[in-house]
């Protein structure tokens, strides 16, 4: 193989973003993806005439993720729904009052509850989340919201927009920031799926000369006093001085022989990956045209309903895409039972859907995030370097600084890339090395 300055393991959003930053600085980059497709969890699958993200995907704007994409010259194309959501309680569907005019229209909340919800909505965006301190979302909510039903609704919305079903463990700051974006209309559904983001990132990387290789399964990163080479599962090797791994925490740990003697061990011991069971449906049409809303929050079960076609194009023939998610938290779930519950949930919000089904994808155990901002972490700043192994860097959702999901992925990708660039620059200056610049 040719020589490269930097190898990036993983061709998802983090890997592609890191590759662009490094290549922009003039260094040569190879990106290695084990599967036959780029995109990782950001892929969109075409089924019949529909485009299915891997489970419900919404882009929360005005955060680190969007700002990184902007820096990379990528603008998001999609739509932000105006509030149109329901709450489900004891298998009954209720509109969620979103303004004073709806205060008297629904019976999910007592009048006191409705007032409390309105107050919360008015207050939420004024909260300075940086100043909340190290308390949990639950602790914050119990202090600020007196109506228990409103608290439960808040937990349900938070669970749906963070994938963290643990209000007692989830740091209030990051959780409230995500709620602020939700309540202020910063939730974007990407037209034709997240694959469009992957395509834009891939095009940028290719234009900058990044060598992209699929079917390249990395099995080990060899090092002595510093990173030496990458070993592939077919026994081939690639000598390279810097590696950014974006493959997820567990996978990263296994790629490093002796990881137990590094910071990776601490990061792994504190991590709480959160999982979700996803049922993605394509329907000819909504069986209940009146039941046309973007989101459904189950208050007494960890279930979420989402119809992105309410606001944006997700099919070529007008078919409707529905995502249902059961939040599993850190548990592995029970695929048969979870599927049954998701189908039953659909019966509640869209009775008659079964005859409209064209196709589906069931993903019983997706990792929405390899870690979250939990109160009991020991280290709130994992990465970007693995201090014991010079030349090794990490990026991905578990290496955030209080961000969530793709915000954490993209911001950490930038952080890792900048750290690598800095090192290459210093080493180049120190040893008079010429940069290896290759365009393929
Ligand atoms: C069901 C679900 C719903 C989600 N919803 C949202 C949402 O609404 N909003 C939001 O912001 N985020 C959401 N996310 C999270 C978002 O999808 C991720 O943050 C983002 O796609 C992660 O990108 P990544 O590159 O960090 O990781 P990944 O996409 O996981 O990419 C890692 C890549 O590394 C590759 N790889 C792994 N091991 C190796 C190896 N040994 N050698 C070579 N390659 C390897 C993998 O094949 C993969 O392509 C959701 C995730 C899921 C699963």
Image (cartoon, grey):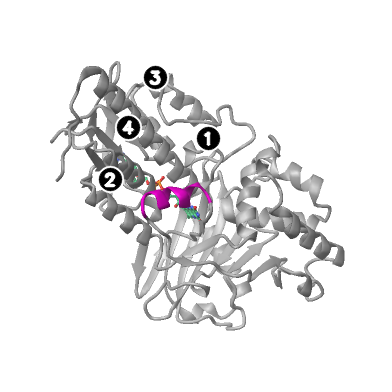
Name the foreground residue: 333 vs 385. 385
Rendered position, 195 above or below 266: below
Structural distance between the alpha carbons of marks 3 and 1? 19 Å
Q: Nearer the viewer, mark 4 or mark 2?
A: 4
Looking at the rendered structure, the secondary structure element under dot 2 is: loop
- Return the mark for residue 33: 2
| Mark 4: secondary structure | helix
Position of the N terminus, as image quadrant, is: top left
The Cα atoms of the two marked residues, 4 and 3, are separated by 19 Å
Residue 241 image point, x, y percent? 25, 26
Kind of element beneath mark 1: loop
| Measured Cα–Cα span from mark 2 to mark 1 | 24 Å
| Residue span colored magenta | 63-73
Q: Main secondary structure of the magenta part?
A: helix
329 or 336, which is in the foreground? 329
Cα gap from disc 3 to disc 2, whole angstroms = 25 Å
User: In this picture, is 86 found above or below 438?
Assistant: below
Q: Is residue 227 visible?
A: no
């Amino acid at each position: 193989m040719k020589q490269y300055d930097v190898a990036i393991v993983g061709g998802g959003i983090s890997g592609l973003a890191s590759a662009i930053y490094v290549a922009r600085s003039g260094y040569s980059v190879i990106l290695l993806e084990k599967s036959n497709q780029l995109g990782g969890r950001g892929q969109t699958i075409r089924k019949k005439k529909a485009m299915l993200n891997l489970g419900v995907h919404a882009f929360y704007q005005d955060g680190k993720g969007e700002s990184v994409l902007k820096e990379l010259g990528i603008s998001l194309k999609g739509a932000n729904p105006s509030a149109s959501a329901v709450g489900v309680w004891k298998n009954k569907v209720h509109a969620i009052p979103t303004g004073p005019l709806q205060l008297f229209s629904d019976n999910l909340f007592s009048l006191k509850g409705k007032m409390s919800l309105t107050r919360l909505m008015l207050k939420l965006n004024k909260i300075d989340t940086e100043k909340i301190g190290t308390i949990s979302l639950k602790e914050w909510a119990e202090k600020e919201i007196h109506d228990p039903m409103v608290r439960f609704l808040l937990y349900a919305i938070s669970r749906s927009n963070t994938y963290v079903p643990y209000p007692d463990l989830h740091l209030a700051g990051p959780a409230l920031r995500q709620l602020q974006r939700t309540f202020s209309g910063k939730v974007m559904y990407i037209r034709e799926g997240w694959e469009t983001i992957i395509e834009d990132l891939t095009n940028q990387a290719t234009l900058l000369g990044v060598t992209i290789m699929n079917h390249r399964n990395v099995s080990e990163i060899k090092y002595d006093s510093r990173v030496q080479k990458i070993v592939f599962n077919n026994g081939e090797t690639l000598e390279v001085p810097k590696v950014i791994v974006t493959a997820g925490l567990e996978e990263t740990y296994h790629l490093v022989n002796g990881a137990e003697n590094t910071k990776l061990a601490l990061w792994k011991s504190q991590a709480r990956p959160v999982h979700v069971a996803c049922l993605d449906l394509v329907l000819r049409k909504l069986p209940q045209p009146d039941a046309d809303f973007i989101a459904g929050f189950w208050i007494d079960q960890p279930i979420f309903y989402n119809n992105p076609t309410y606001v944006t194009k997700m099919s070529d023939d007008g078919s409707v895409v529905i995502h249902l998610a059961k939040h599993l938290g850190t548990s592995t779930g029970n695929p048969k039972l979870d599927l049954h519950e998701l189908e039953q949930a659909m019966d509640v919000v869209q009775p008659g859907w079964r005859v409209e089904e064209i196709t589906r994808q069931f993903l019983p155990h997706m990792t929405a995030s390899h870690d979250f901002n939990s109160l009991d972490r020991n280290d709130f700043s994992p990465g970007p370097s693995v201090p014991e192994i010079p030349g090794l860097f990490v990026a991905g959702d578990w290496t955030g600084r209080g961000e969530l999901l793709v915000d954490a992925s993209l911001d950490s990708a930038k952080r890792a890339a900048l750290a690598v660039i800095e090192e290459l620059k210093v080493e180049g200056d120190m040893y008079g090395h010429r940069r290896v610049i290759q365009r393929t």
